Amino acid sequence: MDEISRYAVGLDIGTSTVRAVVASVMKDGRLNVIGSAEVPNSGMRRGAVVNLAGPAQAIDKVLGEVERMGGYEINAATISINGSQILSTRTEGKIAAVTANHEINQEDLARLTDVALEGEIPANQEILDVVPLQYVLDGQAGIKDPLGMVALKIEMQANVVSTLVSTYDNLRKASESANVTPEGVVPSVVAAARAVLNERQMENGVAVVDIGASTTGIAIYEESDLQYVGVVPVGSNNITNDLAVMLAIDTEVAEEIKRRFATGSFGENEGSVVIRWRGKDLHFERDQIDEVVQARLDEILELVHKELKKARYEQRLPEGIVLTGGGARMRDIDKFVRMTLGMSVKIGASTGLSGLVEKIQKPEFSAAVGLMLTSAENEGRAAAPKKSRKKSGKKSADKGPGLLKKFFGKF
Ligand SMILES: Nc1ncnc2c1ncn2[C@@H]1O[C@H](COP(=O)(O)OP(=O)(O)OP(=O)(O)O)[C@@H](O)[C@H]1O
Ligand SMILES: [Mg+2]
């Protein structure tokens, strides 16, 4: 039998839904997905926590579900962060070598990062990632890996991803209230990109657009590096709410209309549709639905275009756009995005994993899969939970003692 060395856990804390994906990591590094689950969330607004109890309960519930599937216990996970407070800042740092013929080492790179960050990132921002874009050695640009090279003057250009400290702290608190230690915190759109992009796309230039319930995230890659990340505070729930207001209907009916009848092929839909609700048939004109959906999609795409422009990538993405998130499920949305933004568009979902993958090969699971992949990469960290996950309510009845050992004992 294949030997399992540890488990990788991804936890996507979305505004509407919390999703978890668990995989076992074999001794040879191969992954096998052994569990996934999703539960509705509350207590979040536009990707950020506004009430600790809501996400804490949802996290507890979703992990309870995956734990039951596999008979293991989860104390740590790589979690997602979201919200328009997430920023990308370009910085530069410069240091001089201490002696001639000095070979660049990790310490130099750490010093260079410190210099690049100094005074650039406000104190109220939590740094999530520093992505070195290129090094310049004695004026020679375009160097990706300077370790071991010789230079007198070492410069670095980097993309710093950060968010508000309070947003970050509250997310961690919500996670810790559910007895999950966040071993890593990754912007949801970056996690989704990790799951749906291939190396060629990341090298040539591509943008992932994650259309969630109340946010739309944009992550741009080129030369295999994360060049830019931004989040706009509008998502697919805005379409539902617009339908509810404009058609004077309950949001439940509006959601059903959106899922069943909204498409990106505007102008091609004629006649009316019927929804059965509380024993009554409700009739809606398709052109009216189209009008409401198109207006909101236009707005979302205008904001996406603004982000692409801000990043100076609106006209140089050879691999186009990859759409993920639940909002990407709308029929023909890819056609509409291609027409509006003038770029090739694909719908992204994770592929190439083995195990229980059927449920997770959907756009809305991309972020959770990417978080699991990140957890798998960060070897060792998942193995060091700071405290035991306390059991609450029904979940504890399903497990016996010793399961914690089953989960973490092999690390
Ligand atoms: N089949 C479908 N057709 C159209 N929209 C859909 C469909 N399935 C889900 N959605 C929409 O996708 C949205 C939820 O997406 P997702 O689960 O990615 O969001 P989230 O991660 O909870 O939110 P956020 O990323 O904004 O924090 C909802 O607005 C939902 O109505
Ligand atoms: Mg999301």
Image (cartoon, helix red, strand yellow):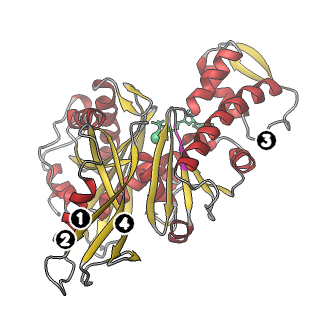
Q: Main secondary structure of the magenta part?
A: strand
Residue picked out by circle 2: 108
- The x and y percentages for residue 221 are 49, 61
Query: Can you tell which quarter of the image residue 82 is in?
Result: top left
> Of label 4 and label 1, which has the lower sequence position?
4
Check whether the beta carbons of the residues at disc 2 and disc 4 lie within 8 A of each other.
Answer: no
> So how many labels did they put on this image?
4
Residue picked out by circle 3: 265
> Of label 4 and label 3, which has the lower sequence position?
4
> Of label 2 and label 3, which has the lower sequence position?
2
The amino acid type found where label 1 is placed reads Leu
Check whether the beta carbons of the residues at disc 2 and disc 1 lie within 8 A of each other.
Answer: yes
Question: What residue is rendered at 26% in x and 79% in y?
Answer: 147
Question: What residue is rendered at 32% in x and 78% in y?
Answer: 138
Residue picked out by circle 1: 112
Give the alpha-carbon distance from disc 4 to disc 3, as whole Å.
39 Å
> What SS does tag 2 mark?
helix
Q: Is residue 200 above or below residue 370?
A: below
Part of the protein shown in magenta: 209-213
In the image, which disc is placed on residue 31? 4
Q: Residues within 10 Å of mark 4 (few under 14, many from 20)?
A: many
Instruction: Specify whether 198 is left or right of 295.
Output: left
